[in-house]
Amino acid sequence: MKKILITMIVLMLALVVVNGAMAWGGPGNGMRGGYGCPGYAADVTPEQAQKAAAFQQAIQPQQQKVFQLRNEIWTLRNQQNPDWNAISAKQKEMVDLRTQIQKQAVDSGLAGAGYGYGPRGRGMGRW
């Protein structure tokens, strides 16, 4: 009886592990190997790549400030009694920084690029 019980438990655990692995799956519809769209990089000219690299360098301090503000907001939210006015002020500051980054993207000729936009439109990124 013990052998049957142990065998059943081992089989059930193996089934759970296999089922979890099957549910995890792999790249789905149109993902071709992982996150993002690797085929999109082939469509970029060297001039566009340089422009994008220069833009990334230009906005790096602003991105660092956005990350810092996000951490400060989480810290404020996780306090025992959150100060919602301070949280609101930090959120407004973060929105202003993101708007500045978007304006710089337009000025750099990179409008439309960013989160969620791939060669086939919305849905390849963050959205």
Image (cartoon, rainbow, N blue to C red):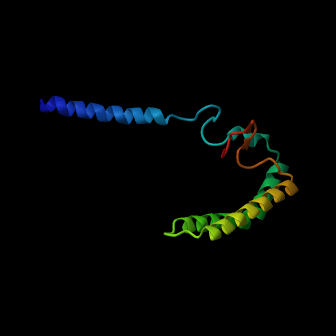
- Quick one: quadrant of the N terminus? top left
Q: Is residue 20 left or right of residue 48?
A: left
> Which quadrant holds residue 98?
bottom right
Q: Position of residue 17 (x, y in %)?
A: 37, 36
Direction from residue 86 to residue 22 in the image, left or right: left
Q: Please provide percent x and percent y for residue 47.
A: 85, 50
For residue 76, which quarter of the picture?
A: bottom right
| Total residue callouts | 0
Q: Residue at x 61, y 67 (%)?
A: 84
Q: What's the residue at 15%, 31% (across, down)?
A: 3
Image quadrant of residue 37? top right
Q: Is residue 43 above or below residue 101?
A: above
Q: Is residue 14 left or right of residue 25?
A: left
Q: Quadrant of the C terminus?
A: top right
Give coordinates of residue 28: x percent, y percent: 59, 33
Regarding residue 101, the answer to whether it shows in the image is yes
Judged left or right of residue 1, residue 89 is right
31 or 85, which lies in front?
85
Query: Does residue 4 sit above or below 121 in this rendering?
Result: above
Taking the image as drawn, is residue 64 in sight? no
Which residue is found at the position 75% from the left and 64% from the top?
A: 97
Of residues 90 and 25, the one drawn nearer to the viewer in this rendering: 90
- Residue 13's x, y, as percent? 30, 36
